[in-house]
């Protein structure tokens, strides 16, 4: 039983699907949590403190890292096998077949962009928050020299997205995630057999909605803080 | 009509192949694609050259023997037909047509455009059958079958096993073929008896033969000459996963 998840193509796909679903659930939670920062810095920081250096947050972080690693490792493993199955000689002429999305053929590329974005994101936030707390630190020095508490997530958000290049990088990252999910969501259901001809249009529509909600939810926070930084202490945002 | 053909020529399985260019002239628009290749071969034989080897049998879209990757499409540019069912009127006069064999590690080239599709036969042998008593023929109508189930089974059974799915798939996956075989039997009471064993055995054989992992791009159903739906892949996934969970 344990081994069909490694030695059968359908078992490996199942691992891909379940780990993808797990990441999707996490990312939905994360997106919802970020939205709180728009409404109240205090409420957001209360969440940050809850998810700081305590045992359940650490277990959560470890499980999450495991999920990413499994998804990532299987993605490369499957893609490597698939390239081998395709053979050494490639077609001289290729086309995009009818009804086939670009994203579906470039899931690994999109995933790698998501992964790189993740590394950037962890260096911006996790390394300044949970990691600092773990090391017993009580303050973080930002690149502009200002000092904040590692639990002051709202301040770190504000600082990160006052820089235009971070805004651009994050939006590119979210766009890759959007594309990954436009295929990923319905593909994950197809992999566990939860699809049929009647449901394909609905599932693909659902994927678009889920991907767009997640993109929108993340993007609005980034853009909100950037716009706020532009108009600095003007009365309307103060 | 006149055409420039770029055809993959390869002496045998071990030789390195390459594209060769040929001109065919004064082809009637109602000539079928394979007849056009016959005309080319006739010319080549007259010139003392080796004719182009390609697979074909019934030439009416039922046997699944013809193949060919034509201008980027398995079975040519038309939807829902086999190569033997396409006609030169579907191309433009003067067009260059690139003809390649199926490209998939599990379908090695034997010669020119002919590939070995024995891997599909091996998958079928692993489970694409039902066990029945050899006795007097049972009454075909003795077991009532819902029309919707019979229809779905027949849709899946339309698969001719030509290999276009694996040849098209960027992952070299044979899932559409295996799914069609599993699905056509899974929808009928006669096929249910061995359902779990069949799904596991055929998937295991497919993996063993080196076909890739499906990533649900849907390219196979777009190029399938019988328009087999990937809904059958979803059913195969259900059959397989349920069978595995019972283990
Ligand atoms: C770490 C970087 C990532 C890489 C390299 C990656 C790569 C892949 C690949 C290659 C697939 C298989 C394509 C397919 O089967 O259709 C896939 C599927 C999927 N991914 Fe990712 N991905 C990454 C991150 C993510 C994240 C962060 C999420 C969630 C928000 C996610 C959600 C999914 C889902 C839902 C599927 C569909 C599963 C299925 O087809 O059965 N992925 N990913
Ligand atoms: S030759 Fe029989 S299907 Fe084309």
Image (tube, coloured by chain):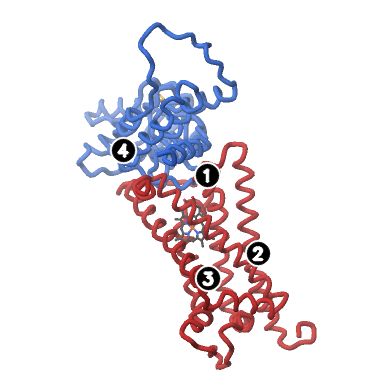
Please state which of the two labelled residues, at mark 1 or mark 2, is closer to the viewer. Answer: 1
User: Marks 2 and 3: same chain?
Assistant: yes
Numbered disc 1: secondary structure = helix
State whether label 1 is within 8 Å of ligand 1: yes
In 3D space, how far apart are the residues under numbered discs 4 and 3 (Cα atoms)?
52 Å
Q: Going by the image, does A4 lie left or right of B28?
A: left
Quadrant for the C terminus of chain A in the image: bottom right
- Mark 4, secondary structure of its residue: loop
- Supply the letter of whichever chain is blue: B
Q: For mark 1, does the 10 Å Cα neighbourhood hold few (<14), some (14 to 19), or many (20 or more) residues? A: many
Which residue matches tag 3?
A56
Using the rendered image of the protein, determine whether residue B55 is visible from the camera's viewpoint: yes
Please state the horizontal and vertical placement of residue A95, each as a whole percent of the image: 47, 46
Task: Name the disc covering residue B107, or none.
Answer: 4
Gap in angstroms between the C-alphas marked 4 and 2 = 45 Å
Read off the residue under disc 1: A190
Q: Position of residue B118 (x, y in %)?
A: 30, 31
Q: Residue furthest right?
A: A235
Is there a contact, CB below 8 Å, between mark 1 and mark 4?
Answer: no
- Seen in the image, is A178 located left or right of residue B131? right
Q: Quadrant of residue A214?
A: bottom right
Q: Residue A52, image x and y in percent?
A: 55, 77
> Disc 4 vs disc 2: Cβ atoms closer than 8 Å?
no
Disc 2 target residue: A216
Question: Chain A is which colour?
Answer: red
Give the label, 1 or 3, closer to the camera. 3
- Within 10 angstroms of label 3, few (less than 14), some, or many (20 or more) residues? few
Spatial CA distance of label 1 from label 2 is 25 Å
Marks 1 and 2: same chain? yes
């Amino acid at each position: 039983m344990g081994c069909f998840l490694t030695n059968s193509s359908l078992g490996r796909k199942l691992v891909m699907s379940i780990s993808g679903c797990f990441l999707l659930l996490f990312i939905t939670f994360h997106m919802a949590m970020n939205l709180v920062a728009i409404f109240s810095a205090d409420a957001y920081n209360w969440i940050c403190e809850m998810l700081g250096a305590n045992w359940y947050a650490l277990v959560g972080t470890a499980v999450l890292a495991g999920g990413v690693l499994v998804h990532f490792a299987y993605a490369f493993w499957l893609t490597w096998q698939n390239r081998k199955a395709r053979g050494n000689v490639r077609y001289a002429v290729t086309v995009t077949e009818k009804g086939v999305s670009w994203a579906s053929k470039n899931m690994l590329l999109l995933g790698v962009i998501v992964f790189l974005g993740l590394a950037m994101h962890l260096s911006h936030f996790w390394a300044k928050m949970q990691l600092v707390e773990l090391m017993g630190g009580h303050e973080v020095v930002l690149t502009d020299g200002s000092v904040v508490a590692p639990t002051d997530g709202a301040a770190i958000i504000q600082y990160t997205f006052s820089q235009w290049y971070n805004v651009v990088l994050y939006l590119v990252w979210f766009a890759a995630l959007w594309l990954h999910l436009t295929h990923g969501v319905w593909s994950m259901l197809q992999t566990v057999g939860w699809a049929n001809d009647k449901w394909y249009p609905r599932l693909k529509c659902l994927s678009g909605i889920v991907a767009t909600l997640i993109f929108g939810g993340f993007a609005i926070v980034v853009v909100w803080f950037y716009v706020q930084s532009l108009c600095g202490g003007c009365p309307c945002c103060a | 009509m006149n055409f420039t053909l770029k055809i993959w020529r390869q002496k045998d399985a071990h030789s390195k192949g390459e594209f060769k260019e040929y001109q065919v002239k004064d082809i009637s628009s109602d000539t079928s694609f394979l007849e056009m290749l016959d005309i080319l071969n006739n010319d080549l034989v007259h010139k003392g050259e080796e004719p182009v080897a390609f697979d074909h049998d019934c030439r009416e879209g039922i046997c699944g023997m013809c193949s060919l990757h034509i201008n980027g499409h398995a079975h040519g540019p038309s939807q829902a037909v086999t190569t033997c069912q396409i006609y030169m009127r579907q191309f433009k006069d003067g067009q260059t047509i690139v003809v390649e064999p199926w490209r998939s590690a599990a379908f090695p080239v034997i010669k020119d455009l002919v590939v070995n599709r024995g891997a599909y036969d091996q998958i079928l042998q692993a489970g694409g059958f039902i066990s029945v008593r050899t006795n007097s023929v049972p009454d075909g109508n003795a077991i009532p079958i819902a029309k919707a189930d019979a229809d779905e089974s027949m849709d899946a059974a339309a698969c001719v096993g030509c290999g276009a799915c694996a040849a098209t798939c960027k992952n070299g996956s044979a899932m559409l073929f295996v799914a069609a075989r599993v699905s056509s039997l899974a929808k009928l009471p006669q096929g249910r008896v061995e359902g779990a064993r069949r799904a596991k055995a055929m998937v295991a054989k497919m993996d063993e033969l080196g076909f890739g992992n499906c990533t649900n791009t849907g390219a196979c159903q777009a190029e399938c000459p019988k328009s087999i739906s990937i809904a059958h892949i979803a059913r195969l996934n259900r059959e397989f996963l349920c069978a595995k969970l019972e283990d």
